[in-house]
Image: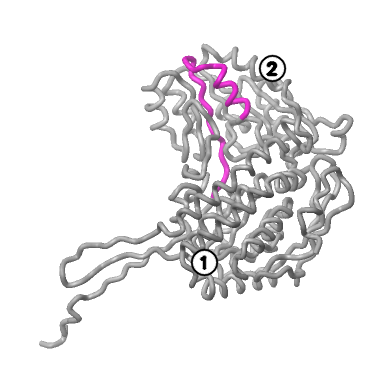
Amino acid sequence: MNQQFSAIQRHGGPVEEYPNLYIGGSWVAPQDGGMIESIDPATGAVWARVAYGGKADVDRAVAAAREAFEGEWSRIAPHERAAMLRKFADLYAAKVEDLAQLETRDSGRALRETRADIGMHAQYYHWFASLADKHDGRSIPMGDAVHVFTSRLPVGVVGMICPWNVPLMSACWKLGPALAAGCTVVLKPAEQTPVTALALARLFEEAGFPAGVVNVVPGYGRGGAGEALAEHEGVDKIAFTGEGETARAILRTGAQSLKKYTFELGGKSPHILFADADVEQALNAATNSAWTLCGQSCALGSRVMVQRPIYDQVVEAFAARAAKVRVGLPLDPATHMGPQSSAEQMEKTLRYVQIGREEGAELVAGGNRLDAGALSNGYFVEPTVFAGARNDMRIAREEIFGPVAALIPFDDEEEAVALANDTAYGLTAGLWTRDVGRAHRVSARIRAGIVWVNTYRYIRWTTPYGGFKASGWGRENGVEAMDAYLDTRTTVISTTGKFPDAYAD
């Protein structure tokens, strides 16, 4: 079989073939699917062809997951599940470089970023392994007549739908707690970035997970494997990361079966720079959080709100730093920022640049496609900075998912909080100040799932991550992540065995 890590072509070469899905512990050809072409965003050329599944394949995968859940997997003690996850984590750690290369080819993210990101994933899996035997219940005092206690049980079969911007990270955040809790899964990666999910399947196979515990079915969303998962009555829960409108469609599709859901959706995060901040450190964070992941992150600090005394200084520094970002081929370790993940996403980003101009914001850096020399066929966009932006502009309200920063001036603390919360989203936020009191006051009033003070994008396995408002439901990471994959059962046992006859008189 050619689905091996040794098949990775690091310097171009023939199109790679991944002809099978992973269902029930076996590599099988799709029944009603076909082959997806994965486009290298740096070249615009096909670099891999990957099998995708349809409804019949999802039916097979769900049946395999159900059989595993009710069979062998349910009889494995939590500490044994933990041992399997740790073995998988160690295998994952040994393949970081190969996985980083694959994700870079598939998504266009710069290799220096994929190496750093994927290099931490094994620790996430180890963390969730440590929680596999910790989800115990509690005893509820109710007097001598009954003994009441709760138990925490896995929800069952989980359909996981992952995005194209961070496919391995998103899968990690879902697979870790689901498997630790004792669930079985059907993973559907985005059709644009399917390759790394199959690499994960190979590692689960090598780690000795029972057949059917993890199934991988690449496919399309609407009308394809994603919709089939969402509506399948054999799926107990959907874990989805992606765009809000897709989440609403998933809810409508799955309403009949009353599934459980977790949604990690979009953001338009405020990044607030007060005049008393350490400006140099704030700029380090603000520029990085505006352009990391080619701007394709839901936690992007794209609304940079700057107090007026330092506003001109920050605008000038943003423009200067934008010019220093090395945009280039993503497999080059010297590249800071690679291409957008698809032609569609590049075109969307460039449309928003034009919208920003039309709305009256001042374009002070970037805004163009880069298509010279080695970049000629790729989807590259310059780091872009708008000054004089207002919070009512579309570039400040709508998620662009491109390397576009909108710099918004503000006067005082009250205005900063009002602007920060004036959004449909509530995923993340950041603020910079040397005033400890201000740090507490402002962070306490921002409606976001995570607020960073004098740092940004500090995300770890122990820190809950998720959003308010249109940014989603539930939390990933931390012990809170386990809640999404566990149900609570209450058991009441009479200590007397007596029950009165209500109709005796």
82 up-or-down from 472: above or below: below
Residue bearing the label numbered 1: 236
The residue depicted at 56 percent of the width and 23 percent of the height is 408
Specify whether 189 is left or right of 180. right
284 drawn magenta: yes
* Of the pair 87 and 418, the residue shown nearer to us: 87
Residue at x-position 47% and y-position 65%:
155
Check disc 2: other Cα within 10 Å, few if <14, some if 14-19, many if 20+: few
Picture quadrant of residue 91:
bottom right
Q: Is residue 83 left or right of residue 107?
A: left
| Image point (70%, 35%), residue name | 112
Q: Which mark is residue 320?
A: 2
Residue at mark 1 to residue at mark 2: CA–CA distance: 51 Å
The image quadrant where one finds the N terminus is: bottom right
Q: Is residue 273 magenta?
A: yes
Q: Residues within 10 Å of mark 1 (few under 14, many from 20)?
A: many
Total labels drawn: 2
Say if residue 469 shows up in the picture: no
N-term mark: 1 or 2? 1
Relative to residue 246, is residue 426 depicted above or below? above
- Is the image coloured rainbow, by chain, by secondary structure, or in one colour? one colour
**First to last magenta residue range:** 264-288
Q: Is residue 309 above or below residue 475?
A: above
Quarter of the image that includes the C terminus: bottom left
Let me know if residue 267 appears in the view: yes
Residue 37 in the image, given as x and y percentages of width and height: 81, 55
Query: What residue is shown at x 56% (from left), y 36% (from top)?
Result: 268
Q: Identify the element where label 1 is drawn.
A: loop
Rendered view: 55 above or below 263: below
Quarter of the view holding residue 222 = bottom right
The amino acid at mark 2 is Ala
Q: How far from the left and from the top, in percent, is residue 395?
A: 63, 31
